[in-house]
Amino acid sequence: MINEISVPFHGSNLFVVRYNNEPYIPMKPVVEGIGLDWRTQARKLRSSSERWGVVMMTTPSTDPYNSVTCIPLRKLFGWLQTLQPNRIREDIRDKVIQYQNECDDVLWKHWTKQNTPNEIMPVMPPSSMRVLMYMEKGHVVSMQPVPEDSVVFRTEDIPKLLKEPGYFTVQQLKSVADTALSQLAMCAEQAMSLRR
């Protein structure tokens, strides 16, 4: 098993390093590959070091004499999604989108190819997938795939959405109304039994 691999990615050399049996990413090459200011991004990463799982380590190919800022590969997708292309300089906007769309998958594929025997190669998720993320205290605690024909919204938005034309078919509205009437009848019955 190797401790570090170099991954060419759209003109940059990115790295994946083994730390505590898990792949970590030195972030400076990623940030500079995108075209962002490293000092600003390093400050942001370190200010939320617990959120991003930041580890300072010495890596031979990145900087053999100084510690570099690394995050787990599993956190890279989340970090990339914090970059808002519409708030970034126009000259690097396409690069940001390119990294958001491809970088974590490319690094994962290189890492698993180097560190997993071919017969047990993991199945990669589709490159495009809708997910519902559950968060607690600012951290994603679980994710659930959302089918393409599904809509996710807050329960308090239901009355407003029911009034919007085009969200629901007549049959769906009838089903919602039947369910709501049934629930109201059950609540009224419980309230009456409590009054007795």
Image (spheres, rainbow, N blue to C red):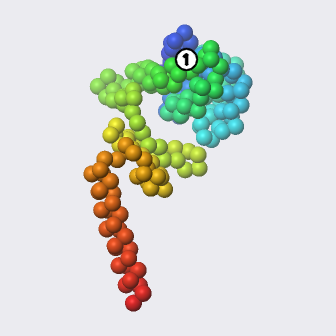
Residue at 41% from the left image edge and 80% from the top image edge: 191
Relative horizontal placement of residue 54, taking residue 192 as reference (left or right): right
Q: Is residue 62 visible?
A: no
Judge from the rendering whether residue 76 lies leftward or rightward of residue 178; answer left or right. Answer: right
- Asked where in the image residue 96 lies, by quadrant, the reply is top right
* Percent coordinates x, y for residue 83 in the rendering: 59, 29
Q: 178 and 110: which one is in front?
A: 178
In the image, 140 versus 86, the foreground residue is: 86
User: Circle 1 — which element?
Assistant: helix
**Residue type marked 1:** Asp
Residue in the foreground of this view, choosing between 86 and 132: 86
Q: Residue 188: image x %, image y %?
A: 38, 76
Quarter of the C terminus within the rendering: bottom left
In the figure, is residue 112 to the left or right of 18? left
- On screen, residue 105 above or below 135: above
Q: Residue at x 60, y 40 (%)?
A: 51
Q: Compared with residue 184, is residue 74 higher up or lower down, i.e. above or below?
A: above
Q: Nearer the viewer, residue 137 or 169?
A: 169
* Residue sitting at the far bottom: 196
Identify the residue at horizontal 59%, vertical 36% (top origin): 52
In the depicted structure, whether residue 53 falls above or below residue 42 = below
Where, by quadrant of the figure, is residue 36 drawn? top right
Which residue lies under the disc numbered 1? 94
* Quadrant where the image shows the N terminus: top left
Q: Residues within 10 Å of mark 1 (few under 14, many from 20)?
A: some
- Across and down, in percent, residue 137 comes to 59, 50
Q: Residue furthest left?
A: 171
The picture quadrant where one finds residue 86 is: top right
**Residue 84 seen in this snapshot:** yes
